[in-house]
Image (tube, rainbow, N blue to C red):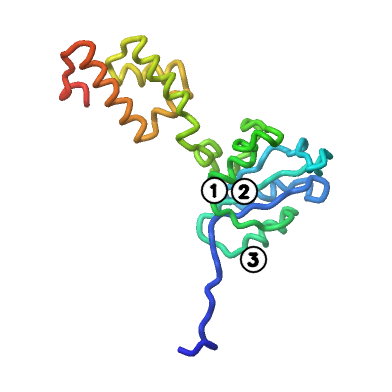
Amino acid sequence: MSKSSTKVPIARTRNYATIIYPESAPVDWIAKLEALHIPALVSPLHDKDKLPDGTLKKAHYHLLLSFGSVKTKKQAEAVFNIIGGVGTEVVNCLSAYARYLIHMDNPEKAQYSKEDVVALSGANFEAVSYIPDDDLNIIRDMIRFIRDNQIISFSRFVDLCANNNPEWLKILTVKKISLFFFQYIKSLAWDMKGEFNYETDRK
């Protein structure tokens, strides 16, 4: 095949972002977006961001779209045009951009609440923005609680989390972390009682 007949493949990806300025977007832009049934995360209104000289930036929203299949930048741009989006950015890391919606990893920037993130069409901010390292301090608290209260039953610990601490329960449902706690409680039971029944307690 000659060079002249070789086609350069068009770059495609699932995740794109844009910026929405309230004064230039349609009043019902969120409703228009929701009608498209594309999983989307909308940041809180960024109205406290500052330029390097200290002046406030124009208030804006960050919008993250996660298509069900790969799209070209032009296809994403067509969606953003419907809702008044400014610019079309290819998102290389979904979790990093989701965290940027509230400046989670940028303490030098204005901070926004995750409670104000709007999730549309099945998007889940907690799931997308979750990074295990965020929970190391919480995991330490969980370990301390298990040891201080001499908990030697994994099922009892799960029940305690379910009834009293939803944040701990969320962490515990991560496969690798739940396995870690199961093994930790099993080991603690063995240390404390010397009579841990592996065949019974692992069920």
SS assignment at label 2: strand
Q: Earlier in the sequence, mark 2 or mark 1?
A: 2
Quadrant in the rendering for residue 176: top left
Mark number displayed over residue 94: 1
Q: Residues within 10 Å of mark 1 (few under 14, many from 20)?
A: some
Amino acid type assigned to the residue bearing label 3 in the image: Lys
Residue that numbered label 2 is attached to: 64
At horizontal 68% and vertical 52% (from top left) the residue drawn is 18
The location of residue 80, given as percent across then percent down, is 69, 56
Mark number displayed over residue 74: 3
In the displayed structure, would residue 47 be above or below residue 189? below
SS assignment at label 3: helix
The location of residue 200, given as percent across then percent down, is 17, 22
Position of 78 with respect to 169 (left or right) is right
Q: Earlier in the sequence, mark 3 or mark 1?
A: 3
In the displayed structure, would residue 119 be above or below residue 192? below
Q: Quadrant of the N terminus?
A: bottom left
